Image (spheres, rainbow, N blue to C red):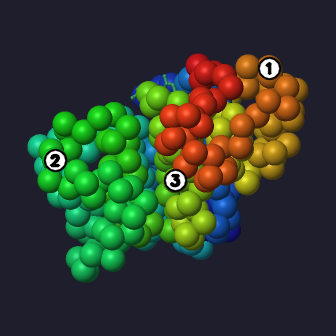
């Protein structure tokens, strides 16, 4: 198991945000956490990346207990995160932002830069533009690109589709599939449960700080309770194939474009 979150409890002051969450992510998987606002998804990712301390339980990565390892060392160990709210440096250029992602590695990063440019051609086109003047979707790409510059073994993504137009949502999900296809394990948090379940191998449903369901993602897409609570109750027949990279390429063509069948579940 590449990443093992073992019965973690996390508090904000006296408030228990996580009440014993266990999640495991195997090498090569896309695993998604879904759940309502306040369920504890962001807190779980922050505890993995070292931005929050746990009260009890353990986080193990690559065979090592990293529960007390500081965040910057977790990045070096191979945990990459594109944070909620993006967190890019607005005054730096797109390229400088990307290079910041590789800063701690102290090695030549031209190969990683070329790969990020290949995944996100827009970031190559706009390499000299100030990060803060990029559009919301472009900043999201930049945040993911910057995380990839550190060559993570696992990439933590917190709501990468948040605030994006339907066409860009499709694109971001396709790129996540491509990143995974190229060998990076992904732990994905999404409100857009339908699309997340379509690209993920396995999924966990979180409710008020606890895991209430864990299953192959395809099973949850067909689960009546999950459908009612997180997927707008639609039947399984009208799903779009977000995992199909071709469908996102088609989405760049306005004639062929179509949005997701339903809006976000929040
Ligand atoms: N800085 C904080 N101080 C106090 N409580 C917090 C803080 N951050 C989160 N919480 C609480 O912890 C719980 C879990 O929050 P978290 O942000 O992990 O949820 P989430 O599942 O990511 O929700 P959302 O879908 O809205 O992003 C919530 O009850 C929230 O109010
Ligand atoms: Mg959150």
One can see residue 152 in this view: yes
Screen quadrant of the C terminus: top right
- CA separation, marks 3 and 2? 22 Å
One can see residue 32 in this view: no
List the residue tagged with mark 1.
233
Residue 175's label in the rendered image is 3
Above or below, 214 against 180 in this view is above
Mark with earlier residue (3, 1): 3
Of the two numbered discs 3 and 1 in the rendering, the one whose residue sits closer to the viewer: 3
- For the residue labelled by badge 3, is the local secondary structure a helix, a strand or a loop? helix
Q: Residue furthest left?
A: 91
Screen quadrant of the N terminus: bottom right
Q: Where does the image place residue 101, in percent across and percent down from the top left?
A: 29, 61
Q: Residues within 10 Å of mark 2 (few under 14, many from 20)?
A: some
Whether the residue under disc 2 has CB within 8 Å of ligand 2 = no
Q: Where does the image place residue 83, in percent across and percent down from the top left?
A: 39, 44
Mark with earlier residue (3, 2): 2
Image side of residue 112 versus residue 251, left or right: left
Q: Where does the image place residue 239, in percent across and percent down from the top left?
A: 76, 34
- CA separation, marks 3 and 1? 27 Å
Of the two numbered discs 1 and 2 in the rendering, the one whose residue sits closer to the viewer: 2
Which residue is rendered at x = 73% and y = 25% of the image?
231
Q: Where does the image place residue 257, in percent across and percent down from the top left?
A: 57, 34
- CA separation, marks 1 and 2? 43 Å
Mark with earlier residue (1, 2): 2
Residue 129's label in the rendered image is 2
- For the residue labelled by badge 2, is the local secondary structure a helix, a strand or a loop? loop
Image side of residue 75 versus residue 233, left or right: left
């Amino acid at each position: 198991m590449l990443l093992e979150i073992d019965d973690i409890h996390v508090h904000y002051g006296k408030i228990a945000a996580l009440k014993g969450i266990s999640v495991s992510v195997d090498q090569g998987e896309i695993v998604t956490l879904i759940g309502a606002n306040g369920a504890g998804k962001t807190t779980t990712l922050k505890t993995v990346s070292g931005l929050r301390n746990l009260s009890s339980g353990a986080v193990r990565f690559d065979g090592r207990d990293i529960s007390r390892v500081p965040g910057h060392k977790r990045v070096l160990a191979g945990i990459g995160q594109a944070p909620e709210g993006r967190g890019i440096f607005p005054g730096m250029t797109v390229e400088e932002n990307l290079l910041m992602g590789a800063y701690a590695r102290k090695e030549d990063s031209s190969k990683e830069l070329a790969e990020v440019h290949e995944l996100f051609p827009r970031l190559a086109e706009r390499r000299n533009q100030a990060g803060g003047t990029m559009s919301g979707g472009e900043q999201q790409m930049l945040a993911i690109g910057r995380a990839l510059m550190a060559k993570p073994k696992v990439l933590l993504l917190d709501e990468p589709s948040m605030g994006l137009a339907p066409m860009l949502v499709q694109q971001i999900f396709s790129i996540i599939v491509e990143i995974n296809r190229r060998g990076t394990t992904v732990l994905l948090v999404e409100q857009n449960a339908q699309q997340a379940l379509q690209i993920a191998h396995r999924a966990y449903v979180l409710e008020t700080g606890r895991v209430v369901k864990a299953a192959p993602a395809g099973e949850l897409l067909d689960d009546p309770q999950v459908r009612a609570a997180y997927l707008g109750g639609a039947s399984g027949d009208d799903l779009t194939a977000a995992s199909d990279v071709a469908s996102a390429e088609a989405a760049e063509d306005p004639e062929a474009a179509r949005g997701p069948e339903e809006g976000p579940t929040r």
